[in-house]
């Protein structure tokens, strides 16, 4: 098959390696989930089933790809940080984006029935995916802060919006008009005075999004110091077999994904986990 006269078309496939030594950030977002959530009767403003399904798909992908060291999810989106030194698929951009986006989407569909036993899928959902490279730790901190700040702003708006619609009977247009030009503190005040809702007491899952950590990330293993004098008798083959075995064991150690709903804007989260940004 290799050398037919047609094979030259292969030369049009250009390599797309990602710069080495920089952080890779993959963000997925549900395609037209405004419509999807409508068609599948998501509870507004926050359908817990849908959030848990997203979290589960994210957990699946982190188990499959141990080079993902941190993930953050809100609404129909998820961000995944790959460790700086990852050599996943030789850092080929489209291979990584397409395979991981596809895997996440499959897991979402695969687990649908578990979270929505009474809601048949009306049509196949899809997600878009992109990779952004960030050179410094500060960029990564700011990236995650940006997403969590977004979660907060959206959730405050949506919580107030849906309270006006569901509890006060405003139309969606009226609710939008009510909230036009309001600041954060106005929405807090409105929620409390008209609906008795103390925003800060709402479920952290809604206010903070989901933070997923790999407790058995390869860095924990990689950071174990190597013996200073490797055994001289060890042949290449043996070493290769050993490293394969180590890789397998590493993969087996994968299943420790922790799901948190904590603050990732301040220093505390990061100070306690310097290995994430190694
Ligand atoms: P695009 O294809 O450009 O991403 P979109 O319709 O998916 O368009 P988004 O900005 O991604 O737009 O917003 C996703 C929408 O999905 C939210 O506005 C919300 O209506 C809905 N949604 C997602 N997750 C949930 C959830 N857990 N509960 C309720 N609604 C949700
Ligand atoms: P990569 O992840 O790099 O694509 P791969 O294992 O998928 O690796 P491909 O070159 O894409 O390698 O080859 C796909 C393989 O899948 C084929 O070699 C064949 O063994 C198998 N396969 C795919 N479709 C069929 C089919 N309909 N019947 C039998 N085997 C199939
Ligand atoms: Mg979008
Ligand atoms: Mg979307
Ligand atoms: Mg979105
Ligand atoms: Mg293939």
Image (cartoon, helix red, strand yellow):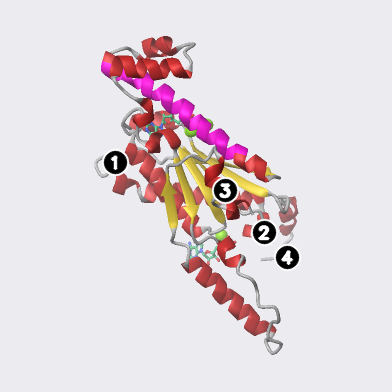
Q: Are marks 1 and 4 in contact (CB under 8 Å)?
A: no
Q: Which residues are magenta?
A: 142-167
Task: Where is residue 233? Give x, y as percent.
Answer: 69, 90
Dot placed on the residue nearer the N-terminal end, 2 or 3: 2
Q: CA distance from mark 4 to mark 2?
A: 25 Å
The quadrant holding residue 122 is top left
Q: CA distance from mark 3 to mark 1?
A: 44 Å
| In front of the other: 139 or 88 | 139
Name the residue that disc number 4 marks. Answer: 3
| Front of the two marks 1 and 4 | 1
Task: Where is residue 261? Give x, y as percent.
Answer: 42, 42
Q: CA distance from mark 2 to mark 3?
A: 31 Å
- In the depicted structure, whether residue 80 falls above or below residue 204: below
Dot placed on the residue nearer the N-terminal end, 3 or 1: 1
Identify the residue at horizontal 47%, vertical 66% (top origin). 253
Q: CA distance from mark 3 to mark 4?
A: 55 Å
| Front of the two marks 3 and 1 | 3
């Amino acid at each position: 098959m290799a050398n037919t006269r047609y094979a030259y078309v292969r030369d049009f496939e250009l390599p797309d390696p990602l710069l080495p030594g920089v952080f890779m950030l993959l963000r997925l977002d549900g395609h037209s989930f405004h419509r999807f959530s409508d068609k599948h009767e998501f509870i507004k403003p926050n359908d817990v089933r849908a959030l848990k399904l997203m979290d589960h798909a994210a957990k699946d992908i982190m188990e499959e790809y141990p080079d993902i060291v941190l993930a953050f999810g809100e609404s129909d989106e998820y961000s995944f940080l790959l460790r700086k030194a990852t050599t996943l698929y030789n850092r080929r951009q489209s291979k990584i984006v397409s395979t991981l986006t596809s895997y996440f989407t499959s897991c979402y569909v695969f687990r649908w029935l578990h979270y929505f036993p009474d809601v048949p899928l009306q049509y196949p959902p899809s997600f878009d995916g992109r990779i952004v490279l960030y050179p410094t730790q500060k960029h990564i901190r700011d990236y995650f802060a940006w997403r969590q700040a977004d979660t907060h702003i959206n959730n405050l708006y949506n919580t107030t919006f849906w309270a006006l619609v569901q509890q006060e009977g405003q139309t969606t247009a009226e609710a939008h008009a009510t909230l036009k030009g309001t600041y954060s503190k106005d929405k807090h005040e409105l929620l409390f005075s008209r609906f008795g809702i103390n925003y800060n007491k709402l479920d952290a899952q809604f206010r903070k999004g989901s933070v997923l950590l790999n407790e058995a990330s390869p860095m924990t293993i990689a950071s174990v110091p190597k013996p200073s004098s490797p055994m001289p008798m060890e042949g290449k083959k043996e070493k290769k077999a050993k490293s394969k075995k180590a890789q397998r064991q590493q993969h087996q150690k994968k299943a420790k994904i922790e799901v948190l709903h904590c603050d990732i804007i301040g220093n505390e989260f990061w100070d306690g986990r310097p290995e994430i940004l190694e």
